[in-house]
Amino acid sequence: MAARTWRRGSTAVASALGVALALSACGGSSSGGTEASGSAGSTGSAECADVAQYGTFNNVKVEIYSSIRDVEAERFEKSFEHFQKCTGIDIQWNGSGEFEAQLQVRVKGNNAPDLAPIPQPGLLQTLVGLNAVKPASEKVATASKANFPADWLTYGTVNGTFYAPPLGANVKSFVWYSPSMFKDNGWAIPQTWDELLKLSDTIAKSGKVDKPWCVGFESGDASGWPGTDWIEDIMLRTQGVETYDQWWQHKIPFNDPKVVDAFDKAGAILKNEAFVNGGTGDVKSIATTAFQDGGKPIVDGQCAMHRQASFYANQWPEGTKVAEDGDVYAFYLPPVDPAKGKPVLGGGEFLAAFNDKPETQAVQLYMQDVNWVNEKAKLGDWITAHKGLKTENVLTVTDQQPNPIQILSVQILQDPNSVFRFDASDMMPASVGAGTFWKGMINWVTGADTKSVTDSIEKSWPAS
């Protein structure tokens, strides 16, 4: 969703790899929509030598339509300033809280954007099925193969054709907490799921906070996606990667007993009135608490834990220090069955092009450039699985210091030995993963039982 996912564990960082590719582009073609600013770029100057390979254009615009909004969108816009000045391409970032639904509306209405970072491979498959997405150019495909792990390329591939290069990434299997709160109360970081439940019970009975957990599932048209992450993380921890893959591929039904068990294990926390929803209300308040606000009661001392991805670092109030000795930090969501290892749930976006105009291809290729990747990271709280990202450039927004959670995430992403699995709901058909599964989580947390919810989602699965 507006991005969602990540990984864990200690890891060795792979060596950085940068790729510079030439892209010859003819200028002059203009795009529809609002008038582009500026005139032809000045790629002949020394100042612009680093982006000269992307060509020079005259008064063209490229619209990027995305679920990424507000402050995060502003950082993307800032990252394009040099490129726009030098190439003459006006990149217009259009963020929407209804992205997943409205992108399909725009495509069907012959009003597709030029580019869109798509967080759900299942949605990408749907759009490819509508003949809306253009296959990646040879140069884009070559850059992707050089810059990203092979697994990440499969998420942008449909029926053997590569369409969308990876963009941002995140690691999801984190639990955010207050280090000082834990230290002051003698609460230890849990190493197993049973220890996590015991800790939750201890905190609930301590009276030190309103409730041990704070949770938020509301996210506009995408409400419910934070709940799907709980189920996915537990599926990985109880069933292992093979069954997890069978699940999202629908080789086992959605209402299989293994999936039902994952819901019930999540319910031991999420549907327990003694455990949630700290600082906000009862269990049902989860459905109406914005995902952006879900963990904030931690800094007010109203709750102790919040399960959310690495990208939640963007949501803490200004001035919040993210560090082991800071205001907030995160630990790995512990395993249920240690024999299943320590799998990592994660996600990211894939940059789909809806036309093959030279300016569109130039921007799609530029967003794989090793220089852009590192400059984007320096703007704060953003990472990618790109092999050329250097951890010293992974900074926080508030103080431009190294971000320990994001650095850990990059190390995991770049480690060839990590057992990583992409967000299952993002891999499912869009009508399920970004539809009935999301809606089902809202119904479930507001009172529906596990069987009725999983049965309903199973019935919604499209016929093959």
Image (tube, grey):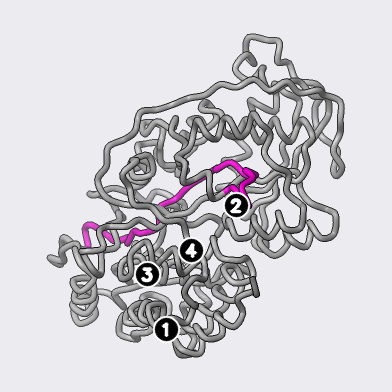
Q: Is residue 80 visible?
A: yes
- Give the spatial CA distance, label 2 vs label 4: 20 Å
In the rendered image, the quadrant that contains the N terminus is: bottom right
Of the image marks 1 and 4, the number of the one nearer the N terminus:
1
Mark 1, residues whose alpha carbon is within 10 Å: few (<14), some, or many (≥20)? Answer: many
The spot of residue 72 in percent (x, y) is 55, 47
Of the image marks 3 and 1, the number of the one nearer the N terminus:
3
* Residue holding disc 2: 68
Where, by quadrant of the figure, is residue 178 drawn?
bottom left
Secondary structure at numbered mark 4: helix
* Residue holding disc 4: 424
Secondary structure at numbered mark 3: helix
Residue at image x 37%, y 76%?
A: 262
- Give the spatial CA distance, label 3 vs label 2: 27 Å
Kindly identify the amino acid type of the residue bearing the numbered disc 1. Answer: Val
Residue at image x 48%, y 30%?
A: 374
Of the image marks 2 and 1, the number of the one nearer the N terminus:
2
Q: Which residues are magenta?
A: 156-181
Q: Is residue 69 visible?
A: no
The spot of residue 208 in percent (x, y) is 22, 74
